[in-house]
Amino acid sequence: MIYMTRLAVLFFSTLLSVGASAADMNVSDAWIRVLPGGAPAGGYFTLHNGARQPVVLVSARSAAFGHVMMHKTVEEGGLSRMLPVERVEVPAGGKIAFAPGSYHLMLMQPSGKVTVGDRIKITMEFAGGQKLTTEFQVRGPTGK
C-alpha cells in the first residue's frame, strides 16, 4: 500500500511540474525587425497561454541566428536601457506581448542574409521542457 501511495504522489507531482503543454500556448503577430549595418535584429510577438496554470518562457533559439537572447527595455532617469531577462512568466489564461519598448528577442549573429519578406522559424523553450516553434515574418526598420 505504501508503494502505491508513493507511486501516486510521484505521478501527480510529475503532472504538476510539467504544467501546460505546447497545445495550450500559441503565438500571434510574430515578426522580426531587421536593421541596417549588421545591428542585432529584434523579435516581437504575443504569447498566449490557454492553460489553467502559468507558463514560464526561459529561452528561444533559431537556426537563422547564432545567438538569441530575451531582453526588456526599461526607462530609468529618462534613459532607455535593454536588460537581459532569464525568464518571462505568462499568467494562466493570459498573454504577454514582446513589443518594441518592452520585452523582445535580440537576434544576433545571423547564419545568412536576412531580408525583408523572409519567414524565419524561432523555437521558444519553456520551464518543464515544452517547446513551441513559430514562423516570424521579417520586416524592415519601421516594422513594415
Image (cartoon, rainbow, N blue to C red):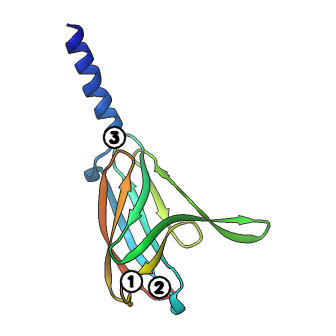
CA separation in Å, label 3 and label 1: 32 Å
Q: Residues within 10 Å of mark 3 (few under 14, many from 20)?
A: many
Image disc number at residue 51: none
Q: Is residue 22 above or below residue 2?
A: below
Contact flag, marks 1 and 2 (Cβ < 8 Å): yes
Label 2 Cα crowd, 10 Å radius (few <14 / some 14-19 / many 20+): many
The quadrant in which residue 75 appears is bottom right
User: Which secondary structure, mark 2?
Assistant: loop
The residue where tag 1 is placed is 138
* Mark 2 or mark 3: whose residue is earlier in sequence: 3
User: Label 1: few (<14), some or many (≥20) within 10 Å?
Assistant: many
Label 3: state its secondary structure.
Answer: loop
From mark 1 to mark 2, how far is it between C-alphas? 7 Å
Kind of residue at badge 1: Val
Comes first in the chain, label 1 or label 2: 2
Closer to the camera in the image, 123 or 94:
123
Please report the residue visible at 31 percent of the width from the left and 68 percent of the height from the top. 134
- What's the amino acid at mark 3? Gly
The N terminus, quarter of image: top left
**Which residue is at the front of the view, 129 or 98?**
129
Q: Earlier in the sequence, mark 3 or mark 1?
A: 3
> Where is mark 3, residue-wise?
19
The residue at the point 55 percent across, 73 percent down is 100
x then y, percent, for residue 140: 46, 88
Residue 49 coordinates in the image, percent (x, y): 37, 51
Under circle 1, the secondary element is: strand
Name the residue carrying label 2.
34
Can you name the residue that lies furthest to the right here?
77
Residue at 29% x, 64% y is: 133
Give the amino acid at mark 2.
Val
Which part of the image, by quadrant, shows the C terminus?
Answer: bottom left
